[in-house]
Image (cartoon, helix red, strand yellow):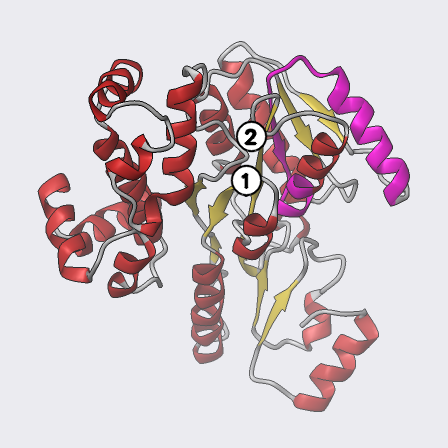
């Protein structure tokens, strides 16, 4: 349910449901008071746990882990200048992500500049202010945005004022909205959250409450799946131009079934020299880098517990499911199903 409070009362009175899932768009008890549900079992999805009564059941966004994942990605790229972009709504999940990101950077001795906490400005004024803020940051810098919309906006403004993404400004969003991320220029790197699991779990909790209304409140947090890497973050920070072109080509095309020869043609030089230079800089062969990117995406998809294993092969560059299963077992020493079970168990601890 979403909407104004009078509409919620009327909907409950009209439909007389057995229970309700309140999708609160990032807000909490101030929008959906338990009184509105007339004693019905209810589960809050996406609400601020601090704004809910102790008796409320919920499935909430993670307070920790999202910003840390973005910080780890930027630090791995060798960046030393950082910023956080908010949209002005000051939602609890945005504040949590900012604190998590800034805290991880602080632990490693770095500061974080913040933009967008003073909401209430129009789109044009915000874009102009964002342009000024981006211009003042030391380059190269890593920008973590509260969600994919804010990240796409950051990319657009950065490119409009003449900065290169990701060479000058690297950008990471949150939500892994594949359509939005895929249409950004360059494509947007994003922290993926397990929204599908959150919906399923909210339904399971509601079912349990309907069956046993006097059961104690059930409170859970949906997990971070991982970082979906795309073109808005460096493929190889500090690599020579020829190797960097190869890395960017691999990142953008590894899942399409390319081979080492396709990469060499982008360098361009002899196959032997390409392999020597690539191994000297990266530490392994061109083929191994293609496989690394493919398996990285396989791992990401396996952490999505509702993604069928059979669908992963074609999405990650293998000709069929059997080829992927054999390659996976050879690399990890276990089946994909066992790896998924272990990874999900670890994320639930």
Q: Which residue is mark 2?
A: 100
Residue 134 lies left or right of residue 78; in this view the side is right
The image shows residue 284 at horizontal and vertical percentages of 22, 23
Around disc 2, counting alpha carbons within 10 Å, would you say few (fewer than 14), some (14 to 19), or many (20 or more)? Answer: many
Query: In the rendered image, which quarter contains the N terminus?
Result: bottom right
Of the pair 345 and 17, the residue shown nearer to us: 345
- Locate residue 99: give its quadrant: top right
Please give the name of the residue rendered at 89% of the width and 41% of the height, measured from the top-left corner.
124
Can residue 74 be seen at all in this image of the molecule?
yes
Return the disc, 2 or 1, that comes first in the chain's sequence: 1
- Locate residue 83: give its quadrant: top right
Which residue is farthest top?
109
Residue 249 lies left or right of residue 124; in this view the side is left
Q: Are marks 2 and 1 in contact (CB under 8 Å)?
A: yes
Query: In the rendered image, which quarter contains the C terminus?
Result: top left
Of the pair 3 and 246, the residue shown nearer to us: 246
Please give the name of the residue rendered at 68% of the width and 67% of the height, measured from the top-left corner.
34
Main SS category, magenta section: helix
Can residue 349 be seen at all in this image of the molecule?
no
Does residue 31 belong to the magenta stretch? Answer: no
Q: Which of the labelled discs sits on residue 63, or is there none?
A: 1
Above or below, 302 against 121 in this view is: below
């Amino acid at each position: 349910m979403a909407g104004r409070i009078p509409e919620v009362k009327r909907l409950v009175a009209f439909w007389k449901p057995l229970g309700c899932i309140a999708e609160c768009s990032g807000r909490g008890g101030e929008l959906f008071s338990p009184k509105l549900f007339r004693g019905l079992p209810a589960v809050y999805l996406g609400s601020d746990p601090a704004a809910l009564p102790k008796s409320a059941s919920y499935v909430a966004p993670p307070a920790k882990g999202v910003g840390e994942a973005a910080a780890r990605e930027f630090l791995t790229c060798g960046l030393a200048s950082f910023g956080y972009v908010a949209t002005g709504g000051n939602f609890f999940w945005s504040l949590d992500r900012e604190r998590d990101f800034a805290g991880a950077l602080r632990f490693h001795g770095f500061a974080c500049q913040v933009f967008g906490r003073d909401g209430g400005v129009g789109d044009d004024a915000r874009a102009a202010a964002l342009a000024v803020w981006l211009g003042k940051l030391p380059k190269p810098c890593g920008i973590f945005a509260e969600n994919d919309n804010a990240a796409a906006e950051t990319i657009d403004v950065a490119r409009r004022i003449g900065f290169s993404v990701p060479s000058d400004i690297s950008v990471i969003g949150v939500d892994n909205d594949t359509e939005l991320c895929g249409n950004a220029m360059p494509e947007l790197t994003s922290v993926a959250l397990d929204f599908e699991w959150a919906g399923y779990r909210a339904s399971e909790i509601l079912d349990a409450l309907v069956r046993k209304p006097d059961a104690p409140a059930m409170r859970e947090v949906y997990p971070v799946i991982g970082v979906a890497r795309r073109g808005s973050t460096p493929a190889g920070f500090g690599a020579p131009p020829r190797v960097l072109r190869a890395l960017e080509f691999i990142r953008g095309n590894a899942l399409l079934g390319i081979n080492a020869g396709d990469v060499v043609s982008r360098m361009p030089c002899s196959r032997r020299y390409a392999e020597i230079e690539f191994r000297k800089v990266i530490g392994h062969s061109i083929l191994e880098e293609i496989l690394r990117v493919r398996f990285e995406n396989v791992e990401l998809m396996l952490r999505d517990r509702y993604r069928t294993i059979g669908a992963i092969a074609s999405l990650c560059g293998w000709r069929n499911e059997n080829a992927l299963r054999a390659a996976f077992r050879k690399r990890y020493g276990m089946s994909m199903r066992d790896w998924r079970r272990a990874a999900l168990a670890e994320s639930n601890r």
